[in-house]
Image (cartoon, rainbow, N blue to C red):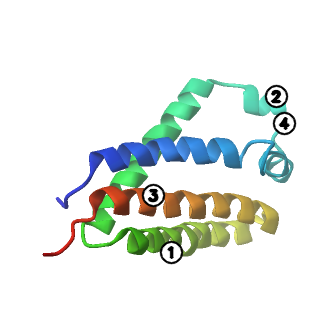
Amino acid sequence: MPEVSWLAVLLCGVATLLIGGLWYSPLLFGRAWQRETGLSDDVLASGSMATRFGLTFLLGLIAGAVFAMFIGTAMTVAQATAAGAAAGIAWVAASFGINYLFERRSLKLWLINGGYHAVQFTTFGAIIGALQWTPVP
Protein backbone atom coordinates (compact mmCIF):
# COMPACT_ATOMS: atom_id res chain seq x y z
CA MET A 1 0.00 0.00 0.00
CA PRO A 2 1.38 3.43 -0.93
CA GLU A 3 2.39 5.84 1.79
CA VAL A 4 -0.59 7.92 2.85
CA SER A 5 -0.71 10.91 5.17
CA TRP A 6 -3.76 10.13 7.27
CA LEU A 7 -3.76 13.73 8.51
CA ALA A 8 -4.13 14.82 4.88
CA VAL A 9 -7.00 12.35 4.43
CA LEU A 10 -8.72 13.72 7.53
CA LEU A 11 -8.29 17.27 6.23
CA CYS A 12 -9.76 16.19 2.86
CA GLY A 13 -12.86 14.98 4.71
CA VAL A 14 -13.12 18.30 6.54
CA ALA A 15 -12.50 20.22 3.30
CA THR A 16 -15.35 18.32 1.64
CA LEU A 17 -17.75 19.62 4.29
CA LEU A 18 -16.39 23.17 4.38
CA ILE A 19 -16.25 23.67 0.62
CA GLY A 20 -19.67 22.06 0.12
CA GLY A 21 -21.18 24.09 2.94
CA LEU A 22 -20.03 27.32 1.32
CA TRP A 23 -20.56 26.24 -2.32
CA TYR A 24 -24.17 25.15 -1.78
CA SER A 25 -25.04 27.99 0.60
CA PRO A 26 -27.15 31.00 -0.42
CA LEU A 27 -23.90 33.01 -0.45
CA LEU A 28 -22.73 31.19 -3.57
CA PHE A 29 -24.77 28.68 -5.58
CA GLY A 30 -27.34 27.28 -3.14
CA ARG A 31 -30.41 29.00 -4.53
CA ALA A 32 -29.47 28.34 -8.15
CA TRP A 33 -28.70 24.70 -7.30
CA GLN A 34 -32.10 24.38 -5.58
CA ARG A 35 -33.91 25.83 -8.60
CA GLU A 36 -32.04 23.58 -11.03
CA THR A 37 -32.68 20.42 -8.98
CA GLY A 38 -36.27 21.33 -8.13
CA LEU A 39 -35.66 20.66 -4.44
CA SER A 40 -37.75 22.73 -2.02
CA ASP A 41 -36.62 23.93 1.39
CA ASP A 42 -38.99 21.38 2.95
CA VAL A 43 -37.47 18.47 1.04
CA LEU A 44 -33.94 19.60 1.90
CA ALA A 45 -34.83 19.95 5.59
CA SER A 46 -36.43 16.49 5.78
CA GLY A 47 -34.49 13.49 7.04
CA SER A 48 -31.46 13.43 9.26
CA MET A 49 -28.97 16.19 8.56
CA ALA A 50 -26.51 14.45 10.89
CA THR A 51 -26.66 11.34 8.72
CA ARG A 52 -26.24 13.37 5.53
CA PHE A 53 -23.25 15.28 6.85
CA GLY A 54 -21.75 12.18 8.45
CA LEU A 55 -21.95 10.22 5.21
CA THR A 56 -20.62 13.21 3.26
CA PHE A 57 -17.62 13.32 5.60
CA LEU A 58 -17.10 9.55 5.22
CA LEU A 59 -17.25 9.76 1.42
CA GLY A 60 -14.81 12.70 1.53
CA LEU A 61 -12.44 10.52 3.58
CA ILE A 62 -12.71 7.68 1.08
CA ALA A 63 -12.11 10.00 -1.89
CA GLY A 64 -9.22 11.68 -0.08
CA ALA A 65 -7.60 8.36 0.86
CA VAL A 66 -7.76 6.96 -2.66
CA PHE A 67 -6.55 10.24 -4.14
CA ALA A 68 -3.66 10.27 -1.64
CA MET A 69 -2.72 6.77 -2.85
CA PHE A 70 -2.90 8.03 -6.43
CA ILE A 71 -0.75 11.10 -5.70
CA GLY A 72 1.87 9.19 -3.72
CA THR A 73 4.89 10.99 -2.30
CA ALA A 74 6.67 12.10 -5.48
CA MET A 75 4.49 15.08 -6.45
CA THR A 76 5.26 18.58 -5.24
CA VAL A 77 2.44 20.74 -3.90
CA ALA A 78 2.05 22.43 -7.30
CA GLN A 79 2.01 19.09 -9.15
CA ALA A 80 -0.46 17.54 -6.72
CA THR A 81 -2.71 20.62 -6.90
CA ALA A 82 -2.66 20.45 -10.71
CA ALA A 83 -3.43 16.71 -10.54
CA GLY A 84 -6.36 17.50 -8.25
CA ALA A 85 -7.70 20.10 -10.67
CA ALA A 86 -7.32 17.65 -13.56
CA ALA A 87 -9.11 14.90 -11.63
CA GLY A 88 -11.93 17.21 -10.59
CA ILE A 89 -12.45 18.62 -14.07
CA ALA A 90 -11.53 15.76 -16.39
CA TRP A 91 -12.68 12.78 -14.33
CA VAL A 92 -15.45 13.88 -12.00
CA ALA A 93 -17.05 16.84 -13.80
CA ALA A 94 -16.66 15.23 -17.22
CA SER A 95 -18.29 12.03 -15.93
CA PHE A 96 -21.15 14.05 -14.47
CA GLY A 97 -21.47 15.74 -17.86
CA ILE A 98 -22.06 12.41 -19.57
CA ASN A 99 -24.85 11.55 -17.14
CA TYR A 100 -26.34 15.04 -17.33
CA LEU A 101 -26.55 14.86 -21.13
CA PHE A 102 -28.69 11.74 -21.00
CA GLU A 103 -30.66 12.85 -17.93
CA ARG A 104 -31.41 16.14 -19.73
CA ARG A 105 -30.14 18.19 -16.80
CA SER A 106 -29.16 21.80 -17.30
CA LEU A 107 -25.74 23.19 -18.12
CA LYS A 108 -26.11 25.44 -15.07
CA LEU A 109 -26.54 22.44 -12.75
CA TRP A 110 -23.54 20.72 -14.34
CA LEU A 111 -21.42 23.83 -13.83
CA ILE A 112 -22.49 24.08 -10.18
CA ASN A 113 -21.94 20.41 -9.31
CA GLY A 114 -18.90 19.89 -11.54
CA GLY A 115 -17.40 23.13 -10.27
CA TYR A 116 -17.77 21.98 -6.68
CA HIS A 117 -15.87 18.77 -7.37
CA ALA A 118 -13.21 20.61 -9.37
CA VAL A 119 -12.59 22.85 -6.35
CA GLN A 120 -12.84 19.88 -3.96
CA PHE A 121 -10.21 17.81 -5.78
CA THR A 122 -7.95 20.81 -6.40
CA THR A 123 -8.03 21.38 -2.64
CA PHE A 124 -7.39 17.67 -2.02
CA GLY A 125 -4.32 17.89 -4.24
CA ALA A 126 -2.99 20.92 -2.37
CA ILE A 127 -3.55 19.30 1.02
CA ILE A 128 -2.07 15.95 0.02
CA GLY A 129 0.84 17.53 -1.81
CA ALA A 130 1.67 19.71 1.20
CA LEU A 131 1.55 16.88 3.73
CA GLN A 132 2.68 13.87 1.74
CA TRP A 133 5.45 15.02 -0.62
CA THR A 134 8.83 13.55 0.14
CA PRO A 135 11.73 15.32 -1.62
CA VAL A 136 14.00 12.99 -3.55
CA PRO A 137 17.58 13.19 -2.19
**On the image, numbered disc 1 is attached to which residue?**
86
Identify the disc placed on residue 124: 3
**On the image, numbered disc 2 is attached to which residue?**
42
Q: Nearer the viewer, mark 1 or mark 4?
A: 1
Residue at the image point whose x is 73% and y is 59% from the top: 112
Q: Nearer the viewer, residue 101 or 74?
A: 74
Residue 63 percent across, percent down from the top left:
42, 53
User: Which amino acid lies under the numbered mark 4 shown in the image of this protein?
Assistant: Ser
Q: Nearer the viewer, residue 92 or 119?
A: 119
User: Which amino acid lies under the numbered mark 2 shown in the image of this protein?
Assistant: Asp
Residue at the image point whose x is 43% and y is 63% from the top: 125
Residue 116 percent across, percent down from the top left:
63, 57
**On the image, numbered disc 4 is attached to which residue?**
40
- The mark that comes first in sequence, 1 or 2, is 2
Residue at the image point whose x is 45% and y is 68% from the top: 81
Question: How far apart are the two marked residues, 1 and 4, measured between alpha carbons?
Answer: 33 Å
Please report contact status of discs 4 and 2: CB closer than 8 Å, yes or no. yes
- The mark that comes first in sequence, 3 or 1, is 1
Occupied quadrant, residue 41: top right
Question: How far apart are the two marked residues, 4 and 3, measured between alpha carbons?
Answer: 31 Å
